[in-house]
Amino acid sequence: MNLITSISEASTSGIRSVLLSQFSPIIQGSGLGYPSADVMPHNTMDWMFIFLIGCMVGIGILRYQFNRRFKQSIQTFFQFYSLNQFTREGNFMSERVGFILFSIYLICLSMFTYQANFVLGSGSLFIGSGISLFLKILVGYSIYFLTKTGINQLTGIIFETREASYLIILDDFIIGCINGLMLIPILFFTTYSPSPIIFYIGGAILAFTFFYRLIRASIIGFTYAPFSLLYLFLYLCSLEIVPLVVIIKILAGNSLY
């Protein structure tokens, strides 16, 4: 009987040792760090917090000093027919309220792109990290929008559609400003509780406003004669669709999913 018990205990011990040797990489350690993972580089939230607070302060200034013009810009975003009335109030793009709103948009769009680089692209979309990479993205977007505005103005002169070109530029400017306001709550979630779902929601908002802007640009073009179909084709392809396709291809090629 004792012999049988000894053999049974030896067999159990042998099986236990085999299991431990096979699964020891999984069960060793305290397990406190599993399955958490560092999504973005360390010390990222410090400067992101400063930029987010700066955007909130900017909105507070607009609500306090330029509340009427601020509300008009939001109204124009939802009510396309009020665009002409909005232009008669002054050149929104050269006003302080427009400058602050579009600056908020550039900061928020750059921050969203920076975070998406690590959450959706595993840090392989852009080289580097930290505030230096964020500033490079910010400068890149600024150059892109300035270039697009200049090309719009140039094509307006070439095709003699100055009024339509100006309204397209202004409408693009206004939609960008409102985009910045919509991205701020998204960025608070993605900064302090990053999740691919939140990024997809932010991307869906940007995609919706992108097509919304194309529809409004087309309406402006067909409303203000003589608007060349060739101009509309060149505008949509060279300044809107092609850059979007390139960005989607890059993101799709580097996505974790």
Image (cartoon, rainbow, N blue to C red):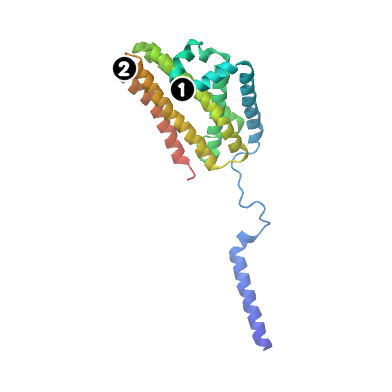
Does residue 34 show up? yes
* Snapshot quadrant of residue 12: bottom right
**Type of the residue with mark 1:** Gln
The vertical placement of 180 against 165, above or below, is below
Q: Which residue is rendered at x = 64% and y = 39% of the image?
A: 42
Give whichever of discs 2 and 1 has the lower sequence position.
1
Residue matched to label 1: 79
Q: Which mark is residue 228?
A: 2
Q: Which mark is residue 211?
A: none
The vertical placement of 154 against 205, above or below, is above
Neighbourhood count class around disc 1 (C-alpha, 10 Å): few under 14, some 14–19, many 20 upward: few
Residue 99: image x %, image y %?
56, 17
The vertical placement of 70 against 23, above or below, is above
**Type of the residue with mark 2:** Ser
Residue 130: image x %, image y %?
61, 33
> Left of 211 or right of it: where is 130?
right
Q: How many marks?
A: 2
Quadrant of the rendering where the N terminus is positioned: bottom right
The vertical placement of 132 against 119, above or below, is above
Q: Which residue is rendered at x = 52% and y = 25% of the image?
A: 178
Q: Which residue is rendered at x = 36% and y = 18% of the image?
A: 221
Neighbourhood count class around disc 2 (C-alpha, 10 Å): few under 14, some 14–19, many 20 upward: some
Residue 216: image x %, image y %?
40, 23
Determine the CA span between mark 2 and mark 1: 25 Å
Label 2 secondary element:
loop
Q: Which residue is rendered at x = 60% and y = 18% of the image?
A: 67
